[in-house]
Image (spheres, helix red, strand yellow):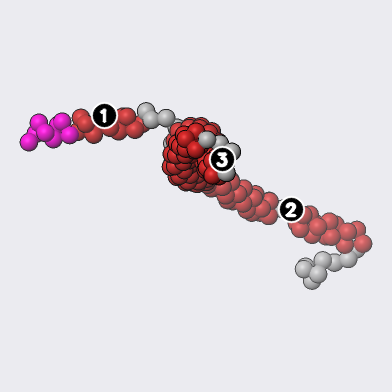
Amino acid sequence: MNIFRRLFKIGEAETNSAIDKMEDPIKMTEQGIRDMRLDLDKSLEALAQVKAMAIRSKSEQEEFQNKADDYQNKAIIILKKASTNEIDTAEADRLAKEALAQKDSAEKQLLRAKEESAKFDNSVEQIQKSIQTIKANIGNWENELKTLKARVKVSNATKNLNKQMAELDSTGTVSMLERMKEKVAQEEALAEAYGDIAKASKSIDDEIDKAADTSTAKADNDLAKLKEQLGLKNSKNS
């Protein structure tokens, strides 16, 4: 069983390989249409030839019919002349027999021409059917080719798009975006930290400046000096 299974796998692989190596189906279809057009040309040529023979056969029918009628009439004329002693009776009988023999030959040829004509007509009908079939096949194949080309375009476009989508993460685009997001987040956090530090430093400086402010004491001292110069008593001392 293992041997058969192995052989089946080998055959399956060779079949798939043969399919992969097949020509482009579009080119094969186009070649098939070209071949059918050649067949159509050959069929049209054959149709013309058979129709020509059919026409010739009908002409021969008319020709042989006229001959048969002519020999028939000649035999009658000869016999009539013999009855009026214009021709010797024995000679008239001989010539009348010859005329009737020619008539018989013409009728046989007429029968052959009719049979051939019937065959030619049958051949014309068959060839015309073949031509119609070929034309219909060409039309169907041309429509199939249009559909196939459209499907190939859609298939290629879809394949390329899917390929791009499949390769999107492998190109590092998604990873790069994630790294950029992380870096921006870090920068935002760092900016916030610097802001907090700046606020804290400013608050300490404000407290120090407030504690070290001597402007109020100086103003009180200047006021006391001015009152002393004016001879005014300090309200505090009174």
Rendered-image quadrant of the C terminus = bottom right
Residue 51: x %, y % from top left: 54, 39
Determine the CA span between mark 3 and mark 2: 182 Å
Rendered-image quadrant of the N terminus = top left
Q: Amino acid at mark 1?
A: Glu
Q: Nearer the viewer, residue 160 or 19?
A: 19
Q: Amino acid at mark 3?
A: Asn
Outermost left residue: 1
Residue with the mark numbered 1 = 14
Q: Secondary structure at mark 1?
A: helix
Q: Magenta stretch?
A: 1-8
Residue with the mark numbered 2 = 214
Q: Secondary structure at mark 2?
A: loop
Q: Amino acid at mark 2?
A: Thr
Q: Nearer the viewer, mark 2 or mark 1?
A: 1
| Res 227 quadrant in image | bottom right
- The dot on residue 85 is 3
- The dot on residue 219 is none
Magenta stretch contains residue 4: yes
Asked if labels 3 and 1 touch by Cβ distance under 8 angstroms, the answer is: no
Q: Nearer the viewer, residue 91 or 127?
A: 91
At 34% from the left and 33% from the top, the residue drawn is: 19
Determine the CA span between mark 1 and mark 3: 98 Å
